[in-house]
Image: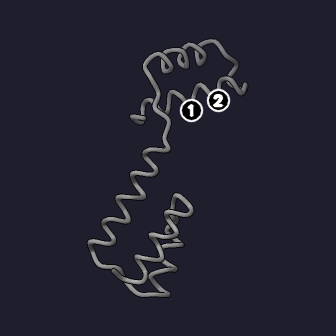
Amino acid sequence: MTETFERLKAALLAQGTLTDEEIASAISASGDMTPEENMWLSAEIYERQRAAQTTVTMEQFLQANHVLDTADPASEEYRAAQKTVDAFLAGN
């Protein structure tokens, strides 16, 4: 395994996620990773992001739609309901 991969893997385990800037910085400091290492790192970051997303049920979606129909668009309740609807429509 490359030094870059080891460094990024340790950072991912410690932080839970990595930014593109962190990855680019590690690559410029230690060199490229192998295609397999790059694929593993990308998949692990994706899985962690996916696990962190909230799943919205149909019932929550319908309740949020009701709030959108009845609440004032400037209210915090409306904004929260809009986020729920957007998450549901995005497939979360």
Name the residue at 39% across, 34% down.
Answer: 91
Q: Quadrant of residue 32?
A: bottom left
Q: Position of residue 41 (x, y in %)?
A: 38, 65
Q: Residue furthest left?
A: 36
Q: Pointer 2: residues within 10 angstroms few (<14), some, or many (20+)?
A: some
Question: CB under 8 Å between callouts 2 and 1?
Answer: yes
Q: Is residue 89 left or right of residue 25?
A: left
Q: Amino acid at mark 1?
A: Lys
Q: Nearer the viewer, residue 81 or 18?
A: 18
> What is the quadrant of the N terminus in the image?
bottom left
User: Which numbered dot is residue 83?
Assistant: 1
Q: Up-down: is 68 above or below 39? A: above
Q: Nearer the viewer, residue 11 or 32?
A: 11
User: Which numbered dot is residue 79?
Assistant: 2
Q: Pointer 1: residues within 10 angstroms few (<14), some, or many (20+)?
A: few
Q: Position of residue 60 (x, y in %)?
A: 51, 19
> What is the quadrant of the C terminus in the image?
top left
Q: Amino acid at mark 2?
A: Arg
Q: How many marks?
A: 2
Q: Position of residue 5 (x, y in %)?
A: 40, 76
Q: Up-down: is 30 above or below 57? A: below
Callout 1 secondary element: helix
Separation of marks 2 and 1 at Cα, in angstroms? 6 Å
Q: Residue furthest right?
A: 75
Q: Is residue 3 left or right of residue 37?
A: right
